[in-house]
Amino acid sequence: MGISFKDVTHLYPGVKRKEFTLALEDINLDINEKDEFIAIVGKTGSGKSTLIQHMNALMLPTKGTVQIFDNLITPKKRKNPKLKNVRKRVGFVFQFPEYQLFEETVFKDIMFAPLNFGMKKDEAERRTKEIAKELKIENLLKKSPFNLSGGQMRKVAIAGILSYDPDILLLDEPTRGLDPKGQVEIMELFHQIHKETRKTIVLITHDMDLVYQYATRVVVLNDTKITYDGDKVELFKSGLYKDNNLVKPEVLKLIDYLNEKMHYNLDYNTFTLEDLISKLKEVA
Ligand SMILES: Nc1ncnc2c1ncn2[C@@H]1O[C@H](COP(=O)(O)OP(=O)(O)OP(=O)(O)O)[C@@H](O)[C@H]1O
Ligand SMILES: [Mg+2]
């Protein structure tokens, strides 16, 4: 098992004493160490960001435990294992990755974590160049990370995580605020990493088209609780998506239209508009 939540509750302290916000309640969730592409979805304020931050001990549970590989995270800070061991294995790209950057140059920024985790300097430099090439940001290496566009910053933050090769990748709305081409590029990159390395990816997104295209499992949060954990086709076939304030992916809206108005008989096992077009060509 990669990550395992046991009865996790999270309370945020309020402004006044004895005032709290309940953000997660009795969460039980098991995530495999390999081969999962999990989308975490749910309306705003449902607890998604809070949940994902527990997956690499950025937050401690108020109640319950989170097992992250061989590290057991409990509410008691002093008793917890060294967090470096956790962070090395579970990489996190924040909702606003610009907060993650701090070095003088992009090159140093990407190299920071591998050095921090004990990688030799030439090896870290080699990794940095390799990752920069893969993400097509070689031209940015000498720049200050603070003189970049939002999309470029995001790529640099992602490169900084990939450089130390964690086993599991956590992504909190990685495509938010990017232009459509940037969104496709980033998602294709994660998809490729997932396919090639079998790394587990946990992705928070409000974009149901991305969920339907990429996820192999969907976890739905609604008001602090998990209300669905399973197959994406099943989620949108049933009324459950509506109960959780989700919308149907575009491809399914079109399939519904074709079935209802044009008397097609298409099922929901079509995950992108491109796939649907190919299918329609076959039956035409
Ligand atoms: N730092 C904080 N202090 C106090 N309350 C917080 C804090 N962060 C989040 N909350 C509260 O916890 C609940 C869950 O918030 P969270 O950020 O996990 O939601 P989310 O599902 O990620 O929302 P979004 O889709 O808007 O990003 C909300 O009620 C929110 O107001
Ligand atoms: Mg959030």
Image (cartoon, rainbow, N blue to C red):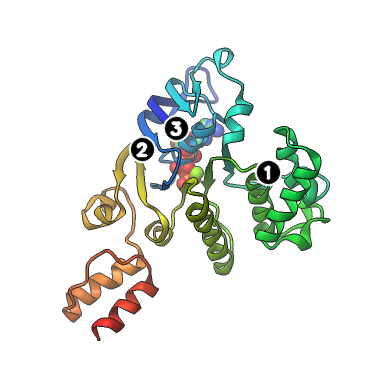
The residues tagged by marks 1 and 2 sit, at their Cα atoms, a distance apart of 27 Å
State the separation of the CA atoms marked 2 and 3.
Answer: 22 Å
Find disc 2 in the rendering and name its residue: 223
Q: Quadrant of the N terminus?
A: top left
Total label count? 3
Q: Residue furthest bottom?
A: 284
Label 3 belongs to which residue?
A: 3
**How far, Cα to Cα, is label 3 from label 1?**
25 Å
Amino acid under label 1?
Tyr
Q: Earlier along the polypeptide chain: callout 1 or callout 2?
A: 1
Along the horizontal axis of the image, is 127 left or right of 24? right
Q: Earlier in the sequence, mark 2 or mark 3?
A: 3
Q: Secondary structure at mark 3?
A: strand
Residue 97 position, x and y percent, is 64, 47
Q: Nearer the viewer, mark 2 or mark 3?
A: 3
Report crowding for label 1: few under 14, some 14 to 19, many 20 or more residues within 10 A (C-alpha): few
Which element is circle 2 on? loop
Q: x, y (%) of residue 227?
A: 29, 40
Whether label 3 touches label 1, CB < 8 Å: no
Residue pictured at 61% horizontal, 43% vertical: 165
Foreground label between 1 and 2: 1
**Nearest to N terminus: mark 3 or mark 1:** 3
When the figure is inspected, residue 61 is found, relative to residue 233, above or below; the finding is above
**Which circle marks residue 99 in the picture?**
1
Ligand 1 contact, mark 1 (Cβ < 8 Å): no
Between 158 and 256, the one lying in front of the other is 158
Three-letter code, disc 2: Asp
Give residue 145's position: percent from left, percent from top.
77, 51
- The residue depicted at 58 percent of the width and 40 percent of the height is 166
